[in-house]
Amino acid sequence: KRWEQSYQSKQDEIHQIGEYLQKQGIEKITLVVASSIGADLGLTFLSQTKIPIEHTFFDGGQFAQISRLTRKIMVPFLYLAIKSLYWSKGATLSKIMWCSEESIKPYFIEAGKNLRYKNLYRQMMDSLEDKEFPKLSEEIQRTIFFEFGSIEEHYKYRDAVKNAYPHSHFPVFQNENHMQMQILDPSAEHSQLAFLRPEHRRIVGGNRQRAQRHGLPYRHPGDDRAFQQIARSAAVLGA
């Protein structure tokens, strides 16, 4: 029988991550990156882990606070939407997302193929809950970047997250949609993260111009001072 991953709960996922890190002998994390609904899990992980984390970058985080009944109603519709990507070989992607790039279709097709209803149900029942965001110390808040595209649907959550974490950073990719840079120009997004591992230095240097095309002049003033430091560090890494 083919092995299948089973989602039990958010706490179980965090436990598995902690176990894996412990087995690998990892005592410090340089960078945590999470996108869309993964940011919901990432935020909970940040609030519970004892491992020091230098930086966290949330790209288009799904920070909706939805009632349990509404989430329960959403499950069959989400299931059919994601499954349709597999059934149609990616043809329905444009009905679900703002783009239908050929480069990302294989990932969505595979996701649709592997999706199980019970896993999705359990994930939705303990994600995007209608309650306060996890408490984070001021020190941890200062290490987090909540990035949104200015025209993406998830941008509407930005104010609520800013109120919950006033010491964090909130760069905005102007005139860009949900995870747009990550999808269309991932190397440029990598260049924005100065805390890349040493083996990525060549990528940083080689794509500096593309990073600048999406960079600081397009971000909201007042939110990007720490990002400016990241950009300067990136330039040093790529030199």
Image: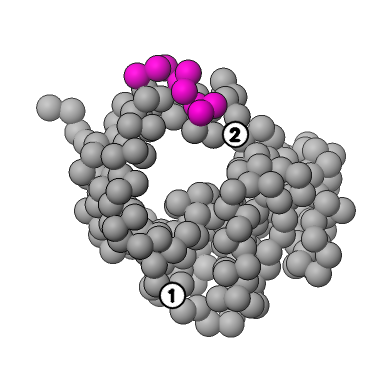
Residue at 52% x, 50% y: name it.
35
User: Given the current orientation, which residue lies at the most extreme right position?
Assistant: 217
Crowd band around label 1 with a 10 angstrom C-alpha radius: few (<14), some (14–19), many (20+) = few
Residue type pointed to by label 2: Trp
First reached walking from the N terminus: tag 1 or tag 2: 2
As measured in the structure, the alpha-carbon distance from the residue carrying label 1 to the one carrying label 2 is: 29 Å
Task: Pinpoint residue 159: horizontal percent, then vertical percent.
Answer: 63, 68
Residue at 63% x, 55% y: name it.
155
Residue 132: give its label. Answer: 1
Q: Is residue 88 magenta?
A: yes
Q: Secondary structure at mark 2?
A: loop
Task: Pinpoint residue 239: horizontal percent, then vertical percent.
Answer: 83, 47
- Quadrant of the rendering where the N terminus is positioned: top left
Task: Pinpoint residue 217: horizontal percent, then vertical percent.
Answer: 87, 53
What's drawn in magenta, residue-wise?
A: 87-95
> How many discs mark residues in the rendered view?
2
User: Is residue 66 among the parts visible in the rendering?
Assistant: yes
Q: Is residue 76 magenta?
A: no
Vertically, is 47 above or below 83? below
- Comparing 3 with 113, the one in front is 113
Residue 166: give its label. Answer: none
Q: Secondary structure at mark 1?
A: loop
Residue at 83% x, 45% y: name it.
212
Image position of 198 (left or right of 53): right
Task: Pinpoint residue 158: horizontal percent, then vertical percent.
Answer: 62, 63
Residue 98: give its label. Answer: 2
Residue type pointed to by label 1: Glu
User: Is residue 25 among the parts visible in the rendering?
Assistant: no
Contact between labelled residues 2 and 1, with CB atoms less than 8 Å apart? no
